[in-house]
Amino acid sequence: MNALTVLLKIRPDREKALEEILLRVQADPSRNEIFHVEEDCLTHCARWAVIHDDENGYRLLLATEFDGDLDSYLTELLRITPGIDEIFGNCESYPGKSGFNDFIRRNYYETQAFYIAFRDETVYTIRDKIAVRKTLQRFLDTQARWAVPLLSVLGSLPVAHSFGKFVKQSINNARVAFHDWWLGILLDIIKPITQLGQTQNFPKVTDPAAAEAGRNLSRLDGQMITITEVKPWRYPRLRLAMAANEFLGKYGYPPGQFAFVGTLFSFRWVLIDNRKRLIFLSVFDGSWQNYMGDFIDKIVWALDGIYNNTKNYPPGGMKQIDAFKAWILSYQYEPQLLFKSYPDETVLNLIRDREININLATQLYTAAGFDSEEMRPLLKAL
Amino acid sequence: MHPSPQIQSVPELFLADVQGIVFSGYGHLPHAHYIFLHFAGCQEARAWVAGVLSFVTTAEPYPVVSGVKRKPASALNIAFTPAGLTALGVSKETVDTFPQEFLAGIESRSDILGDTGSSAPENWDVGGPKNPLIHAMIMAFGHDENELKILVEKQEKLLVRSHGGVVQIAFETACLYPDRKEHFGFHDGVSQPDIEGIHRAPRGDPSCIKRGEVVLGHLDAYDVYPLTPVVPAAQDPDLLLPNLPDGAYLNLRDFGRNGTYIVYRKLAQDVAGFWEFFEKNAGADSHAMIRLASKMVGRWPSGAAVTLRPDFDDMRLSDDNAFNYMPQDPDGYRCPIGAHIRRANPRDSKLNDTPDESTQTSSRHRLVRRALSYGKPLFDREALNRGEAPIGLRDDGHARGLHFFCINASIARQFEFVQQTWCNSPAFNAGFATKDPIIGSNDGTGYMTLQGCPVRTRVAKMPRFVTVRGGAYMFMPGLTSLRFLSTPL
């Protein structure tokens, strides 16, 4: 999976027209004439948002997580967007369809740190797994009458143990223990460093003006876009924090389980405007309130480590919960167009889908019958 | 002002400043009227508040005379909507310091709350766009109907004396039936959080929450003070309101101190539809019907938790709320993971969390519930305790349901969170296409999964049993702030 972050300057006084086009697509993703979003089989999630700052005026932010290489992706985007000129014609220097790929590449920003829940999955493989699970659900719904007695018998059979299995399990246990050991040490080092300069003696009364933050935002669930301003001379520390997050995302936790939060599909940081501003993009399960709760309960260190390098961050960090929420809302944008390839699935759903597929495949291809320790609990809960 | 509930002494003298309903459900006052009001004139409305003030029940302990606790025969509490505060002349500077969700109002939060279709605000009896704008609500309670009538008549006189400045726009009646059951037939109101320093929760009890989760001006679960509405000091020349805690922002006064937010929802219950559904899915067998319904609620009709008594009802556990799920029921084989009470308060069982983490998360989204029924019972609910389900039950065309209130310091983090993230999420705890089977915004397409061995079973086409018929987000001020609202401008 790759990430695309593009910022395009909007032509003077065209921001409202562009917003309207995007909102029109959002309102009717399947039948609009501009952008056939639902035909998109390469994008995991896409956000199109009109953003603004005094220095740069209005810009279009296009942020997606996609499968394959960028050229193939942009070609596919062209194919499913008959109204490409209508959209990008509102942006400065748009050369038309023929120069679309180069246009996007010219305005593309590198990602500094990128976490994705399932690195080995594509939109196709995820949708396949969902389909397998739904088939299995239908099977259990319709065939349980005869399947239950059979499964009861199979389930009561003793689990076969072998020396090979024992060795494999022992090696795995040792690997997990070693992993937990180095992760624990690393986190013990990282956590205090990330919060350097923050105070524990922060005010317990939140500035009442915080109540006004985010008042103009309404669609906050499921994704987040924030653009904050980096403090002067903090670039090295910021890069270090980003590197730590990326490393832990890749090697510290099982797929879908960054800091054992279990609700994060992806997140990334992108520096823009000569390192002056920082875009944070994330895709998550459920509500904004739940997302904030997960952050504050479990990964204070990760976000404090990044955000305390940006301006106006509360001196106590995320522990100043209401001040933090107000701060982040004041830098948050809502996209005019949001597309998710599998909108009804949560990270925990997908983890379960993966386990079902792996176990089914194992059972089918080894023809080992239904006697699987891993499969039993899944069937009970599916 | 009447003193009220059964409260343990606390080191601070704040109880006289908190409205009584916050810490007590007035269990001895089973009859209630809810009077919804609109302010037509600012000065008249403020004078009316001054008149009501003397009736407001506080959270002070009931007096003890000769060793006997003297409980009052009636009680009254009052709350205001944002529009009501504005109509009372509260300045824009102050109103703007209320949280966004409160100012937006319950009608504009339909997507978050699942108030769509038949539950949409357009279809409400109380509140919503088609009814007069609610400014305030009086909650009046009586030991019997006569006591309640006396109290309400006094309130009516106050309305008359306001010379049209305060107008009644809706009136609802409610009661707590002697069997203490809601209309579906289940013992209600068992699960309430104990509040630190107020209730006698055992030390370390996971159900005990910080005072600031319920009342503004006190430390909350995050060990900070919840956001509070404030008044510029210049607008409080008589120094009626206290400063903010810890000497913060001395140019502001704390309008929220000892106040709270109260959410009102009028919930119509389709009792016949409820039992018809279980008859259809479990067969016309009393035991099977009650068992399936109890699995979906998470409690037996007596109130006994299914996770504690998976196979039969047990009256001895009817008020037992001191339990967790993980010790005996991690997989939901007893109480399904998507059951109503396991969603509304997952306790230690949130998937992907350790039991301690889950308990901590759950404790940050607790609600104090105050609910009474309206309408006559449709069937003999006591029969459920004898194992007899209402087979062949048909609707009689009369309205019945619950006037549901919940009290919390943050509507967004507590009430809305529970409704959106736990009750109405089809993927709660890694589930698939299941919403809360009792209060969820089901539309006949979803499922209820009953985890089981060797395989789970699913109940398909879950309908909506509870329809929202009214609602409002209101601020219930402390007594000091009420006095501030009662002073002439």
Image (cartoon, rainbow, N blue to C red):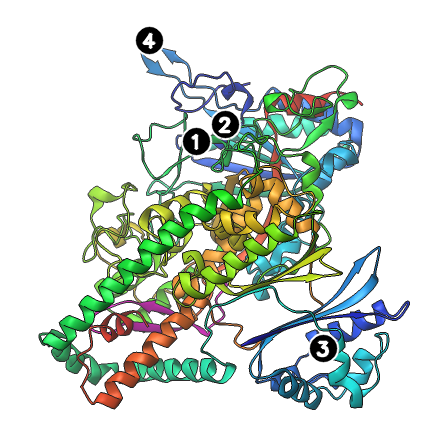
Q: Position of residue B145 (x, y in %)?
A: 47, 33
Q: How far is mark 4 from mark 1, CA to CA?
A: 22 Å
Q: Which residue is mark 2?
A: B20
Give the residues in magenta: B441-460
Of A345 and B96, the residue lying toward us: A345
Mark 3 and mark 1 in contact? Answer it, CB < 8 Å: no
Query: Considering the numbered disc 1 on the image, is that residue within a helix, a strand or a loop?
Result: loop
Mark 2 and mark 1 in contact? Answer it, CB < 8 Å: yes
Q: Tag 4: residue type?
A: Ser
Q: Tag 3: residue type?
A: Val
Q: Which residue is mark 3?
A: A25
Q: Are marks 3 and 1 on the same chain?
A: no
Query: Considering the numbered disc 3 on the image, is that residue within a helix, a strand or a loop?
Result: helix
Query: Considering the numbered disc 2 on the image, is that residue within a helix, a strand or a loop?
Result: helix
Q: How far is mark 4 from mark 2, CA to CA?
A: 23 Å
Q: Tag 2: residue type?
A: Gly
Q: Position of residue A59 (x, y in %)?
A: 79, 66
Q: Tag 1: residue type?
A: Tyr
The chain to which mark 2 is attached is: B
Q: Nearer the viewer, mark 4 or mark 3?
A: 3
Q: Nearer the viewer, mark 2 or mark 3?
A: 3
Q: Which residue is mark 4?
A: B66
Q: Which residue is mark 1?
A: B26
Mark 4 and mark 3 in contact? Answer it, CB < 8 Å: no
Q: How far is mark 3 from mark 1, CA to CA?
A: 53 Å
Callout 1: few (<14), some (14-19), or many (20+) C-alpha neighbours within 10 Å? many
